[in-house]
């Protein structure tokens, strides 16, 4: 009994001491639950996972040659006390994961730090470090993985002992190699950078609105860095300075929204590499470049998802859906979003327009109802109609739907110019259609609305705001957004496009009278190219959308260097607004619709920025998130 008790004490001490060891891996340790996915079998059986430290792919491993891997730090979903049956262990292997040297142990839920019985020296061969457990259906998938990025070599899995596979689409396993103390200086100023979420299709030598995952591989805190972006076909990388709003602690990570530049070469499977060249003003020690692969084509367009809600002032359940969907839209950072409401499907109200009723066929044979929502009029997998019920009182389902919509390739560009003269507003819409889509001969249509946001329930009452189960701030937060004030189209459901040279289109619309009760600063023109077929609900998807506000006076200076043909707005570490190209007539709005000065130092939050391009004269409208 004394021997067992002493062993328990030594294991506890080991777990605590390992927290101070230098370690190396490809997934940040502070992974939030929503950024974590679990890997396993979905049945009873053995599950092995490992990362590969390969000197041929990672300069950090080359620097570590001669140092020792002393153990494994890994993240488990549950307790796995299976050492008695020798089912649970950590291991190291040289050259191949099949050459495993095992150390039998038990695991607890969360992070585990287990030392090998004998350390293994890093040399010229790849080293695999990992673990095995026996998954049971009662416990669920065992292995934690960081979802936003997949690092080649960061997710080796062997299920049911049927053979190892190197997965490049399952995220990066939350596994570290625990190193000897003398290795720590070789990991100073090491940051792994890689695009986290990016469009599937991109334009050559252009910026897209992306997200970059930053993983601090070092044992020290970092505050700023220089990021180099180089794509296939580029002679030199493009660099960007990044100041972190919150310092990145040892082995921690974060995801930063920022413009990312693609390479110059056109084709499928074109690589894009991100590397960190400086950390806190000093030269960074290199780690493996963060590589992603893209389809680069001149037919690429930035996707702007169209979210359409079917609602009514008399719908008592609609405010709940609007509340959580609105939160998801506010938190969305991957792209701009256009939100339109159709006041039909349950009962018409003061906002109902003819087009609202004419779109009810999109519900399919099941009949119409509220609340309901659709994303780019795309029929979800497993469904027969694009409209889906929206009664889930959680942000996550809407946020996930928005993320998936933003990552779909766009098949058209939509550019809008808005003119206002006296009490009327006019608009011009132009763009280009993807060449393959144009060659298909499928009829395409353009819908153009003038919409207004931020209409209060005091002026336009809404049922369901005072339900006893409603969120405490529902009434305070609720606004009627995306209200169609005018449909510019000659056909309510959209005008058919006639394509010109190079698959371009151009449409001018007659002026519309501005209502005396409209708040012009809350209005915008939205347009979207789509298919239209009442007999086949899968032939109604939106190719792309765009929006534009008629903006006003204040201007800001364009950023120097790295200019792109597409205007992008972003903020520096002091909350000051910048643009990637010269712009004028800039306006800034809070998420609630309040106008701010463009030269204001913006606090953390979500903003809408509108401006006119100084070079093209076109109006751009984008969401900016300050973290």
Image (cartoon, rainbow, N blue to C red):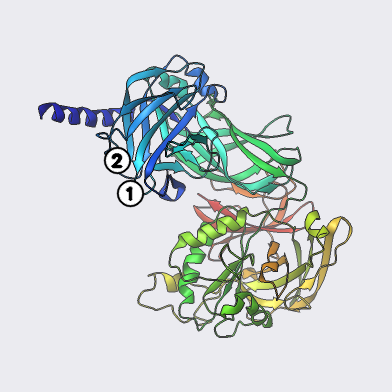
Q: Which residue is mark 1?
A: 139
Question: Which dot marks residue 12?
Answer: none
Between residue 404 and residue 257, name the one nearer to us: 404
Query: Who's the residue at 64% across and 64% down the image?
Result: 376
Residue 613 x/y as whole percent: 74, 54
Between residue 130 and residue 271, name the one nearer to us: 130
Task: Say whether residue 76 is left or right of residue 164.
Answer: left
Between residue 563 and residue 582, name the one nearer to us: 563
Q: Is disc 2 surrounded by few (<14), some (14 to 19) or many (20+) residues within 10 Å?
A: many
Residue 328 x/y as whole percent: 50, 61
Quarter containing the N terminus: top left
Between residue 263 and residue 267, name the one nearer to us: 267
Residue 13, placed above or below residue 550:
above
Disc 2 and disc 1 in contact, CB within 8 angstroms: yes
| Number of numbered discs | 2
Query: Who's the residue at 60% across and 76% down the image?
Result: 363
Residue 602: tell me if it is visible.
yes
Residue 185, placed above or below residue 539:
above
Mark 1 secondary-structure assignment: loop
Question: Which dot marks residue 80?
Answer: 2
- The first of marks 2 and 1 along the sequence is 2
Task: Say whether residue 265 is left or right of residue 238.
Answer: right
Mark 2 secondary-structure assignment: loop
Query: Who's the residue at 59% across and 36% down the image?
Result: 241
Q: Residue furthest left?
A: 1
Residue 66 x/y as whole percent: 45, 14
């Amino acid at each position: 009994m004394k021997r067992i008790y002493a062993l328990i004490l030594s294991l506890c001490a080991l777990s605590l001491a390992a927290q101070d060891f230098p370690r190396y891996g490809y997934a940040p340790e502070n992974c939030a639950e929503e950024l974590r996915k679990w890997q396993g079998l979905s049945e009873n059986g053995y599950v092995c996972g490992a990362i590969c430290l390969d000197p041929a792919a990672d300069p950090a491993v080359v620097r570590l040659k001669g140092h020792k891997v002393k153990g494994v730090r890994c993240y488990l979903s549950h307790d796995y006390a299976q050492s008695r049956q020798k089912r649970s262990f950590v291991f190291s292997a040289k050259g191949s994961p099949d050459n495993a040297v095992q150390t039998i142990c038990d695991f607890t839920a969360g992070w585990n730090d287990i030392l090998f019985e004998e350390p293994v020296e890093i040399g010229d061969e790849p080293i695999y470090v990992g673990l095995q457990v026996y998954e049971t259906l009662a416990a669920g998938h065992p292995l934690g993985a960081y979802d936003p990025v997949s690092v080649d070599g960061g997710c080796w899995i062997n299920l049911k002992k049927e053979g190892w596979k190197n997965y490049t689409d399952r995220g990066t396993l939350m596994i570290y190699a625990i190193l000897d103390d003398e290795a720590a200086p070789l990991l100073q100023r090491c940051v792994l950078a890689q695009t986290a979420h990016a469009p599937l299709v991109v334009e050559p030598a252009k910026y897209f609105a992306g997200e970059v995952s930053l993983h601090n591989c070092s044992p020290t805190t970092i505050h700023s860095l220089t990021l180099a972006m180089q794509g296939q076909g580029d002679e030199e990388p493009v660099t960007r300075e990044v100041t972190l709003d919150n310092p990145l602690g040892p082995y921690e990570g974060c995801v930063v929204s920022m413009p990312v530049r693609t390479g110059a070469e056109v084709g499928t499977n074109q690589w894009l590499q991100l590397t960190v060249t400086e950390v806190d003003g000093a030269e960074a020690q290199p780690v493996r470049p963060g590589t992603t692969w893209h389809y680069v084509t001149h037919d690429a367009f930035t996707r702007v998802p169209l979210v359409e809600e079917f609602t009514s002032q008399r719908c008592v359940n609609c405010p709940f859906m609007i509340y959580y969907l609105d939160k998801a839209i506010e938190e969305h950072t991957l792209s701009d979003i256009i939100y339109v409401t159709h006041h039909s499907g349950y009962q018409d109200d003061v906002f109902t327009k003819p087009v609202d009723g004419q779109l009810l066929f999109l519900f399919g044979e099941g009949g119409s109802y509220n609340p309901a929502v659709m994303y780019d009029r795309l029929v979800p997998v497993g469904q027969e109609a694009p409209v889906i019920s929206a009664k889930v009182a959680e942000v996550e389902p809407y946020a996930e739907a928005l993320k998936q919509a933003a990552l779909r390739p766009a098949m058209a560009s939509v550019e809008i110019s808005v003119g206002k003269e006296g009490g009327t507003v006019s608009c011009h819409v132009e763009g280009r259609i993807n060449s393959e889509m144009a060659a298909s001969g499928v009829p395409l249509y353009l819908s153009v609305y003038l919409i207004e946001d931020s209409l209060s329930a005091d002026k336009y009452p809404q049922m369901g705001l005072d339900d006893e189960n409603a969120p405490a701030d529902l009434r305070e937060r609720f606004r009627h957004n995306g209200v169609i004030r005018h449909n510019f189209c000659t056909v309510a459901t959209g005008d058919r496009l006639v394509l010109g040279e190079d698959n371009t289109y151009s449409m001018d619309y007659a002026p519309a009278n501005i209502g005396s009760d409209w708040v012009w600063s809350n209005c915008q023109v939205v347009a979207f190219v789509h298919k239209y077929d009442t007999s086949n609900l899968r032939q109604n998807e939106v190719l792309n959308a765009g929006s534009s506000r008629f903006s006003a006076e204040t201007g800001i200076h364009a950023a120097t260097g790295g200019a792109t043909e597409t205007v992008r707005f972003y903020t520096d570490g002091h909350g000051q607004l910048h643009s990637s190209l010269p712009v004028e007539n800039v306006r800034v709005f809070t998420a609630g619709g309040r106008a701010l000065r463009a030269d204001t130092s913006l606090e953390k939050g979500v903003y809408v920025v509108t401006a006119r391009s100084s070079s093209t004269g076109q109006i751009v409208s984008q969401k900016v998130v300050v973290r």
